[in-house]
Image (spheres, grey):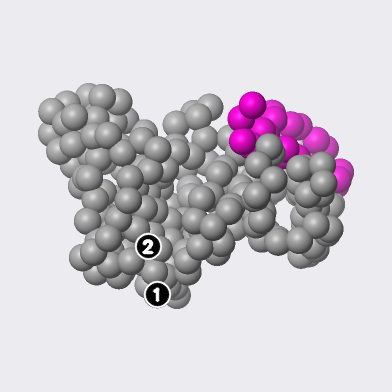
Amino acid sequence: QKEVEQDPGPLSVPEGAIVSLNCTYSNSAFQYFMWYRQYSRKGPELLMYTYSSGNKEDGRFTAQVDKSSKYISLFIRDSQPSDSATYLCAMSEDDKIIFGKGTRLHILP
Amino acid sequence: DGGITQSPKYLFRKEGQNVTLSCEQNLNHDAMYWYRQDPGQGLRLIYYSHIVNDFQKGDIAEGYSVSREKKESFPLTVTSAQKNPTAFYLCASSQGPDSPLHFGNGTRLTVT
């Protein structure tokens, strides 16, 4: 079993919809969880950084961590065409950071 | 404006030549990283450095070399020993363990 699993997509949703992106992981030692957004031919940009189980909100973005199920989610409300990108989850334990392979998201105008 | 600068954005080389990719940061971060990104493969760690004059191999270090002579700079050399050098290379930095990574905008290397 891979340490971090992420559906590659593509995921296509209409503008204004709520988007749900997910990752599962196998290593219960992971303590920190991140979501990155990557536009084509650009570097990943940090969106959310969380430590504990529960929800963290920042504008239209909500990160959710369920350590008991080893499952993290990123919700995007009121999705916009500019949200079209690849979303990478990442998790860390000490100095070891593992990335998911990314989910390609298309927001349809 | 603080950030990470990678140059050049696009790089073309002939097979058998070594090439050095530049990475400079002004975030005052101690740790720096090099990743390689290929379609469908995700991010793979090449080398990382937590402090000046010290660095460690990542998961795919073969055919690559680095140096860390200054806190701000972490250049990556892709040697002729790297069998599949054509890829998108990303440099990142962080304040330290358990801190999130901040990425540059990458260098796309094409070797023919």
Residue A104 is left or right of residue B27, and the answer is: right
- Please tell me which residue is depicted at 34% across the width and 58% down the height of the picture: B49
Image quadrant in which you'd find residue A63: bottom right
Which residue is more in the foreground, A86 or B54?
A: B54
The disc at residue B50 is: 2
Give how far apart the Cα atoms at labels 1 and 2 are. 12 Å
Numbered label tally: 2
Image quadrant in which you'd find residue B55: bottom left
Q: Residues within 10 Å of mark 2 (few under 14, many from 20)?
A: many
Quadrant containing the C terminus of chain B is top left
Image quadrant in which you'd find residue A25: top right
Chain label for disc 1:
B
The relative height of residue A61 versus residue B1 in the rendered view (above or below) is: above
Image marks 1 and 2: residues in contact by CB distance under 8 Å:
no
Q: N-terminal of the two: label 1 or label 2? A: 1
x, y (%) of residue B22?
26, 54
Quadrant containing the N terminus of chain B is bottom left
Q: Residue furthest front?
A: A29
Say which element carries label 1.
Answer: loop
- Please tell me which residue is depicted at 64% across the width and 37% down the height of the picture: A4
- Please tell me which residue is depicted at 18% across the width and 42% down the height of the picture: B19
Which region is colored magenta?
A1-24
The disc at residue B28 is: 1
- Please tell me which residue is depicted at 65% across the width and 57% down the height of the picture: A32
Q: Is residue A17 located in the magenta-colored stretch of the structure? A: yes
Q: Residues within 10 Å of mark 1 (few under 14, many from 20)?
A: few
User: Callout 1, which amino acid?
Assistant: Asn
The relative height of residue B11 versus residue B33 in the rendered view (above or below) is: above
x, y (%) of residue A51?
70, 61
Residue A98 is left or right of residue A22, and the answer is: left
x, y (%) of residue B73?
28, 64
Say which element carries label 2.
Answer: strand
